[in-house]
Image (spheres, rainbow, N blue to C red):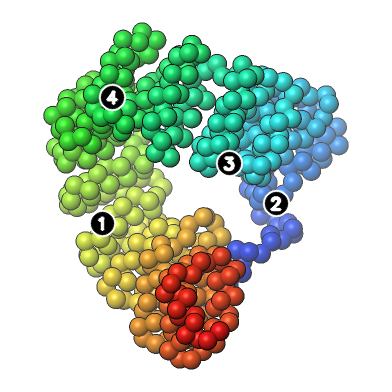
Amino acid sequence: MAFRCLFFTLRRYAYSSRRSISSKTTPMDEAACTCKRDDLTSRMLKLVFPRRSATAVLQNWIDQGHKVTASDLRNVSRQLLKSKRHKHALEILAWMEAQNRFQMSAADHAIRLELIIKIQSLAEAEEYFEHLPNSSSRKAACLPLLHAYVKERAIEKAEALMLKLNDLGLTVSPHPFNEMMKLYMATSQFERVPTVILQMKQNKIPLNVLSYNLWMSACSEVSGVASAEMVYKEMVDDKNVEVGWSTLSTLANIYLKSGLIKKANLALKNAEKKLSAHNRLGYFFLITMYASLSNKEEVLRLWEASKKVGGRITSTNYMCILLCLVKLGDIAEAERIFREWESKCWKYDIRVSNVLLGAYMRTGSMDKAESLHLHTLERGGCPNYKTWEILMEGWMKSQNMDKAINAMKKGLSMLKHCDWRPNPGLVMAIAGFLEEHGNVNDLNQYVKVIHQLGIANLPLYKSLLRMHLLFQRPVFDILKMMEKDEIEMDDETSALVQAFKV
């Protein structure tokens, strides 16, 4: 019965995730902002759903006799960006650029290009960049474009853009060079980072803190600790930069990786002296480092010290300390700090309880995990996909398949709202259960739904092929799904297919 319910739900969500959004409007669209003032910004903020047209609202405002200036439009787009209304902000900037009476600034072009990447595509952003009217706009827009290449690990495109910028004389700050170094670090091409540093020096581009940190990390990977220490010494001698906690924690991490624990601890002590009295960020970098050094005493000492910094301790801060304590195996202390967070939180952030939930699951304490889950629901917590993934994995480990299937159903119901996909191991665990129990019809339906969601893989299809072979079922539909998913067969799969004599 649980499987029938799962399949019905999965079909429904697989279908809804592929459906085009209806163009009909609802009263909710107009109810998002209850403020009484009537100006262009408030009208824009009433557009709850991305499908609504910001351009139509803007044109209606003008048709009513109102005048708009470039400053008004920039202010509206800023407010929309703050509210994460990226599509509407892009529409405003596109409309502004299409009007001859407005002069787009270099910053306007850069923001529009960044939004094109986010809302439309990288290819459209590239085309937009090529048609920018002047060098100042290209200079401003190059960084978001380069950042997109780094995110996509598009090395050739990033290098080509750097060459173009250099030819135009636009590589005048360390930022694009830092992006290139981040790209080489992310793709394990550590030996190329010193080449970027050399280019900066030849072009008289000043190195900033991030430049030195990346250079140090790359040198440690290529040549070891001594090389990284030479870079650190050069940074100390550079009067244009100040050695802060980020550099010293980077150095501590290099020592830690090399097993130089005393040096790592000394670097962290020096980093602590550089911490800001007005910002907690550095504290949590150091807390994480001490957790990696298995130094619980320092983790808790810095946690208490961080509380003396002004401002509210965020849920993210609590998540960090909980993760460190779980890593150190001190679940009791993590529970104490979790209760402290609960007593102070004004909005229940399920991500915080998920840290403890995951710890219970990994230690096999599913009774505690279920109790915590019910407690968070009573407190008004809203489970997210990670909550259901943790519970799913725990229930599968304890062979409670009905609950695991229900958790998968709840998790997959969120596919419309996020990019999460269940862990392939969890997907296969359910398939393995069905295969083990000879549920060929259920397995058929299950694989079809997973295929519709675009997350099917070769092991899943192998499981179904084995079941079809055992029960002498036809194989044509399986091969069709595999072809659509562009699944390449290995020797085992080819042998299974041959056994069907197709």
SS class, disc 3: loop
Q: Residue at x 30, y 67 (%)?
A: 394
Question: Is 452 left, or right, of 21 in this rendering?
Answer: left
Query: Which of marks 4 and 2 precedes in the sequence?
Result: 2
The image's mark for residue 230 is none
Mark 2: give few (<14), some (14-19) or many (20+) Cα within 10 Å: some
Query: Which of marks 4 and 3 precedes in the sequence?
Result: 3
The image's mark for residue 359 is 1
Query: Which of marks 2 and 1 precedes in the sequence?
Result: 2
Residue 464 in the image: state x and y as whole percent: 46, 79
Question: Is 108 left, or right, of 204 in this rendering?
Answer: right
Query: Which of marks 3 and 1 precedes in the sequence?
Result: 3
Are circles 4 and 1 on residues that touch, CB within 8 Å? no
SS class, disc 4: helix
Q: Which residue is identified by label 4? A: 228
Query: Which of marks 2 and 3 precedes in the sequence?
Result: 2
Name the residue type under label 1: Ala
Name the residue type under label 3: Lys
Question: Is 174 left, or right, of 296 in this rendering?
Answer: right
Name the residue type under label 2: Arg
Residue 354 in the image: state x and y as whole percent: 34, 55
Relative depth, front residue between 288 and 207: 207
Name the residue type under label 4: Ala
Q: Which residue is identified by label 2? A: 51
Are circles 1 and 3 on residues that touch, CB within 8 Å? no
